[in-house]
Image: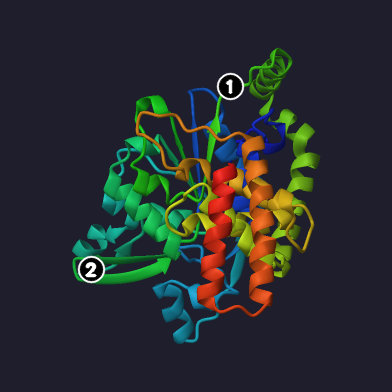
Amino acid sequence: MPVVFPFTAIVGQDDLKRALLLNAVDPGLGGVLIRGERGAGKSTAARALAALLPPIRVVRGCRFHCDPQDPAHWCTECRARAAQGEPLEAVEIPTPFVNLPLAATEERVVGTLDIEAALQSGQRRFQPGLLAAANRGVLYIDEVNLLEDHLVDLLLDVAAMGVNYVEREGVSFQHPARFILVGSMNPEEGDLRPQLLDRFALVVDVKGVDNPVLRAQIMERHLAFERDPEGFYAEWEPRERALRQRLVAARARLPRVQHTEADLFTIAGLTTRFGVEGHRADLVILRAARAHAALEGRLHLTPEDLLRAAALALPHRLKHDPLETVTLSFQELRDALAQAQQQSRRWQRMTQAGQGPAQVDQAAKKVDRAARSTA
């Protein structure tokens, strides 16, 4: 197996690394889209994440990497084997990393009928696709903006459901398809439709580092890696191992991370402040904030967790003119969060005072109008 550039050796790009790590803590978060110029390290970071993730335990012989401890999400084949009384042994494999090529067809992505088996034995057998190979791993799409829209839509649907349902030539099959979806693109080559962009949980805009000292450090590390990949990785392996253990601990901690009613009000106030449509952004911010808290070793949310989550979940969802570049500074976001926290305290006092829904709604609108007028 080829040695991959270590995740912990990546210089700078803190937002990019944070977005990837949050998805690693909570694989159901909804993926990350990396936008940026050529040569900014987008694919390097995605591959490094997959190599960083701990190995997974799978059912021996399963073509879909089913988890032996999670029968509720087994594929059709594992269910049939278990129903026949066959013991399902467990083996350990590296976390899968699948690179989806632009030329991939829908059949190659979702799977199709195994023609060879049909011709040789007359049996209709399912041939897994790339979604099966990526289950419980990382699915990476370089230049996702150049992929056909219907394929992007299909991938996002499967990523959201966690299951791939296939109907092909009389063959009906389903298998788990839970993966961390990572897309990358160069905006100069065209953007994604807003409907598809919104469905990526987090979006990071990256560019080349503009600090000469850090740029020199990037060259030094890449040259050292090219000369001796194994030796370079061995040098960084203790840091990789430490971060891997931190991820494992964060995953175990995540279900115990608590949020309060005040956190929900704050998130709602923040998305309302920026006029975000729909409710996906609210849910993404909450999940990302919980993942951030788990990664930092906490069991409750702090303003910093909400701020870091919002910085990755909001900018690509702001309303703007198609020809306009959206910018949202960290200070703007911090100020908006402070206002949302003030609104949250007012809304909580209303609900605790026992006011009816109509009165609370009317008062909340008044508070929101006042906040907008001072923004």
Residue 161 visible at all: yes
Q: Name the residue carrying label 2.
A: 121
Q: Nearer the viewer, residue 23 or 244?
A: 23
What amino acid is labelled 2 in the image?
Answer: Ser
Residue highlighted by disc 1: 208
- How many C-alpha atoms fall within 10 Å of the one at disc 2: few (<14), some, or many (≥20)? few
**Residue 162 coordinates in the image, percent (x, y):** 45, 64
Q: Which of the pair 111/140 is nearer the observer?
A: 140
Q: In the displayed structure, would residue 70 be above or below residue 222? A: below
Whether residue 99 is situated above or below residue 162 in the rendered picture: above
Could you say where residue 324 lies in the image, as x and y percent from the top left? 40, 29
The answer to which image quadrant residue 223 occupies is top right
Q: How many marks?
A: 2
> If you read the primary sequence from the N terminus, does the residue marked by circle 1 or circle 2 appear first?
2
Left or right of residue 262: residue 78: left
Left or right of 114? Residue 24 is right
In the image, which is nearer the foreground, mark 1 or mark 2?
1
Per the image, label 1 sits on a secondary structure element best described as loop
For residue 254, side relative to residue 127 (left or right): right
| Residue 21 visible in rendering | no
Point out the image quarter for the C terminus: top right
Q: Amino acid at mark 1?
A: Gly
Q: Residues within 10 Å of mark 1 (few under 14, many from 20)?
A: some
Q: Nearer the viewer, residue 94 or 204?
A: 204
The image shows residue 346, relative to residue 186, as above or below, that is below
Mark 1 and mark 2: span between their CA atoms? 55 Å
Percent from the top left, x then y, of residue 191? 36, 34
Which residue shows up at 79% across the image and 59% down it?
Answer: 298
Q: Position of residue 43 (x, y in %)?
A: 52, 34
Secondary structure type for disc 2: helix
Please give the name of the residue rendered at 35% of the width and 48% of the height, measured from the top-left corner.
195
Asked which colour scheme the image uses, the reply is: rainbow
